[in-house]
Amino acid sequence: MNESPLTWGERAQLWLRLGLRAVLALGGLALAVWVGLPLLSLLSPFVLALVLAWLLNPAVKWLQRHSGAPRKAISMVLVILVFAVIGGVLFGLGWAAVGQVRSLFDNRQSLLDELLEGLAGVVNSVQGWLAGLGDFVPQGVITTGEDLMAAVLDWARGLDFSGWLAQMAGQAPSMAANVSNFAVALVVFVMASYFITGDYPRLRFELTDRVPMVARDFCRSLKDIFMSAFGGYIKSQLILSLGVFLILTVGFLFMGQPYGLLLAFALAVLDFIPIIGAGTVMVPWAVIDMVLAQYGEAAGLMAVWGVIVLFRRFAEPKILGNQTGLSPILSLVGIYVGMKLGGVLGMVVGPLLLLVCINLAKLGIFRPVLDDLSLAAADINAILRSGRKREEE
């Protein structure tokens, strides 16, 4: 490595390059946040229609090749079939969910009483255990544990379902407006899906034919990176979460859980979040049931959770494979930073964005920046060394 300082001209060019790259990076980030995200939200029906057209394109090509029917006719049939299946499934699940939600609200007071009774039983059991440990545990620890149990019980007693229902009722007009907006967006999405699927080859040619070959190859590499991260990982996790949802639904059905569908959906969403999983709720739930001597329900919960663990153990390597390629510590970093920046959604997206950045680095996009940073560090080190040499002389 050259230990002599750069000339003033080289140094000016170096810091000018670094400054321009910093300005462009910040400008690109600001453009993505303040323009890209609102534009993506505005055009979301068309973006989703483009994704659906891309997914349906292989099936349309196969049917067109084997049947000889026009592409637009095949596209119409496939789009109608896809939306009919999805709509039927969502309608059936929604109908069952609405019934369970209404039953939940109708029985909210009895459920709250059961919750308080169960918590009181847990508190009494824990306090009994703490009292039995009085000879081995400092009194301050016992007092803290009792205060914690009392605080949990007071929190449960202070739950105000009526106030929450009144707040939900006050938001009904805005919810109605959102429903109407969603209906319009859904109609646009369906129509755009048909138009884009029918003209997908021409639209793709029109888009790619006007792009230079170098930019086309670069965009293809970026597409492969994003698809390996977002497409592969999200698709695999959705399949796994769907499997977990079906296991939970069947398990709660056999257990006779009256709100099994709602619980299965909530736990499947929780299972989609990395690291957390459905076990973070089911295991403590089973422990509380054992404390309350409800051994049948505890055994059922642990059995269902065991099936989920086995399902993920055997299905995850085959479905997910090496889609992420992230070490556990990097996954944990992505989850934590994503949680701090974007909440629950950030916990899911954080590791994926980190994976994209790592793959972009492997592609060599950040190499010029790293070379300039290394050169700047070497130049600063050379300046400091030359200053120390003059002081010694």
Image (cartoon, grey):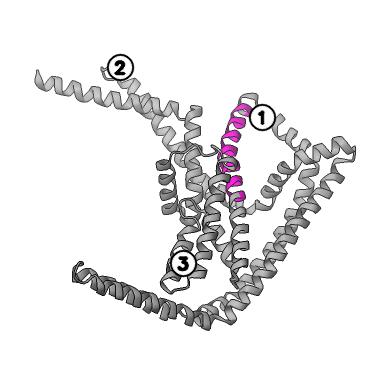
In the rendered structure, which disc, 1 or 3, sits on the residue that comes first in sequence?
Answer: 1
**Position of 233 compared to 20: left or right?**
right
**Residue at (24, 22) in percent of width and height:** 382
- Image quadrant containing the C terminus: top left
User: Would you name the residue on which mark 2 appears?
Assistant: 1
What secondary structure is marked by label 1?
A: loop
**Position of 50 compared to 286: left or right?**
right
Q: Using the image as rendered, state which of residue 189 and residue 25 is in the foreground.
A: 189
Callout 2 crowding tier (Cα within 10 Å): few <14, some 14–19, many ≥20: few
**Residue at (47, 41) in percent of width and height:** 354
Circle 1 or circle 2, nearest the eye: 2
Percent coordinates x, y for residue 376 in the rendering: 32, 26
**Residue at (90, 40) in percent of width and height:** 69
In the rendered structure, which disc, 3 or 2, sits on the residue that comes first in sequence?
Answer: 2
Q: Which residues are magenta?
A: 216-239
User: Would you name the residue on which mark 3 appears?
Assistant: 285
**Residue at (80, 41) in percent of width and height:** 60
Callout 2 amino acid: Met
User: Would you name the residue on which mark 1 appears?
Assistant: 211
Callout 1 crowding tier (Cα within 10 Å): few <14, some 14–19, many ≥20: few
Q: Using the image as rendered, state which of residue 146 and residue 302 is in the foreground.
A: 302
Q: Is residue 228 highlighted in magenta? A: yes
